[in-house]
């Protein structure tokens, strides 16, 4: 069951990335500067590669918005790839431009190349790289910004923070860790946390397995490229039950809790506390430091393919996760309060 739904398209070095979103209530003011500032945040972060110097991601809206406000119809968003200029022939749609330029056939261990080439019967691994690249998260962040604008109307706000880079858990050490990794021609992962505040009680449900908001959040965050683990609230290992579960108390006549180890979710439903989701990103698998691999053309040993990449993208990934969590919350809000206009939504929630 989806109320806030969308599809995205676009390759890393294709002309542009596109999304069509359906289900956004009418009357929502679309703040393009806000969407662009979210795109800018995704491009930042210590350890990003040279592609980010080339791109200056901005959104274009071509449907669903009139005079600055949504009108209830599907919204089309697009973000241009500036680098397309250098890839026009290589990424051409036309059969007459067929070329082997930028083709490659040595699998990158850890990337989608191997399984993707078998699944889609492709001999040129570029045909897998182009869509498996995390470049597509640019348009996802634009969609997340629209979800955030809906949430903002009812007072829900989100943020994120990097909590670990490699073995370093203290922000003072993050840049040093990334610099050392770059010097070695390697890549490095890390961990971040996303927090959303002012969440109403009862988003999601305990009544059926696929309606739990924890499962939906886990899927949305886990499927970001390179994510290997997702946690809701505090990792319970090392706690006994009496320490972990959040006790009730009454403060100023209101029911509240003495802690938030559960990260705002109990029984697959939000409980009114802050929503807290952490995720672990593996080191990016495109590396200067060569790994042993196989060339699919010869079936012989070869060194893995390398092309421009990031040393560390954990900060950007946290922004992408904020966006994905925003989609999930916006969808649950629209499922629960089912409104066609922002005025209706506000009257139902506030
Ligand atoms: C990315 C753009 C890509 C990569 C990165 C994410 O650009 P290019 O491939 O042209 O350098 O920098 O993707 C990966 C590292 C990956 O392994 O998929 C972006 O816009 O975030």
Image: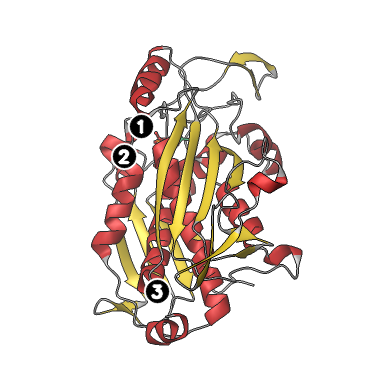
Instruction: Quote the CA–CA distance across marks 2 and 3.
Output: 28 Å
Q: Are marks 2 and 1 in contact (CB under 8 Å)?
A: yes
Specify few, some or many for label 2: CA neighbours under 10 Å numbering under 14, 14-19, or 20 or more: some
Judged from the image, the quadrant occupied by ligand 1 is top left
**Which residue is the site of mark 1?**
48
Above or below, comparing residue 25 to residue 46 in the picture: below
Residue 191 visible in the current orientation: yes
- Residue 76 shows which numbered tag? none
Q: Nearer the viewer, mark 2 or mark 3?
A: 3
Position of 308 with respect to 40 (left or right) is right
Position of 213 with respect to 161 (left or right) is right
Specify few, some or many for label 1: CA neighbours under 10 Å numbering under 14, 14-19, or 20 or more: some
Instruction: Quote the CA–CA distance across marks 2 and 1.
Output: 7 Å
Q: Residue at x 50, y 26 (%)?
A: 286
- Residue 154 shows which numbered tag? 3
Instruction: Identify the mark nearer the N-term, 2 or 3.
Output: 2
Position of 230 with respect to 323 (left or right) is right
**Which residue is the site of mark 2?**
44
Residue 91 visible in the current orientation: no
Instruction: Quote the CA–CA distance across marks 3 and 1.
Output: 34 Å
> x, y (%) of residue 219?
62, 53
Q: Are marks 2 and 3 in contact (CB under 8 Å)?
A: no
> x, y (%) of residue 43?
33, 42
Q: Residue at x 37, y 50 (%)?
A: 15
Element carrying mark 2: loop
Q: Are marks 3 and 1 in contact (CB under 8 Å)?
A: no
């Amino acid at each position: 069951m989806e109320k806030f739904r969308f599809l995205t398209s676009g390759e890393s070095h294709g002309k542009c990335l596109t999304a069509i979103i359906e289900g956004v209530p009418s009357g929502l003011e679309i703040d393009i500067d806000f969407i662009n500032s979210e795109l800018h945040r995704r491009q930042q972060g210590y350890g990003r590669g040279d592609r980010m110097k080339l791109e200056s991601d901005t959104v274009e809206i071509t449907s669903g918005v009139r005079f600055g406000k949504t009108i209830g119809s599907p919204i089309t968003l697009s973000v241009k790839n500036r680098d397309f200029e250098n890839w026009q022939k290589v990424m051409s749609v036309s059969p007459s431009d067929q070329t082997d330029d930028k083709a490659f056939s040595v699998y990158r261990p850890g990337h989608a190349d191997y399984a993707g080439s078998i699944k889609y019967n492709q001999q040129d691994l570029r045909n897998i790289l182009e869509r498996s690249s995390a470049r597509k998260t640019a348009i996802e962040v634009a969609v997340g910004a629209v979800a955030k604008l809906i949430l903002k109307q009812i007072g829900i706000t989100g943020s994120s923070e990097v909590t670990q880079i490699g073995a370093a858990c203290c922000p003072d050490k993050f840049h040093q860790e990334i610099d050392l990794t770059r010097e070695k021609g390697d890549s490095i992962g890390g961990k971040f946390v996303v927090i959303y505040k002012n969440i109403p009680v009862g988003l999601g449900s305990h009544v059926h397995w696929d309606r739990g908001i924890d499962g939906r959040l886990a899927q949305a965050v886990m499927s970001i490229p390179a994510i290997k683990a997702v946690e809701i609230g505090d990792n319970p290992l090392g706690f006994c039950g009496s320490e972990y579960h959040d006790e009730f108390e009454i403060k100023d006549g209101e029911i509240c809790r003495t802690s938030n180890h559960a990260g705002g979710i109990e029984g697959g439903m939000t409980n009114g506390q802050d929503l807290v989701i952490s995720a672990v990103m593996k080191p990016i698998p495109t590396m200067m430091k060569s790994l042993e691999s196989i060339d699919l053309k010869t079936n012989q040993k070869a060194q893995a393919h390398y092309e421009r990449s990031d040393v560390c993208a954990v900060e950007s990934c946290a922004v992408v996760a904020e966006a994905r969590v925003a989609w999930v919350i916006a969808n649950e809000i629209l499922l629960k309060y089912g409104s066609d206009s922002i005025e209706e939504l506000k009257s139902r929630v506030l």
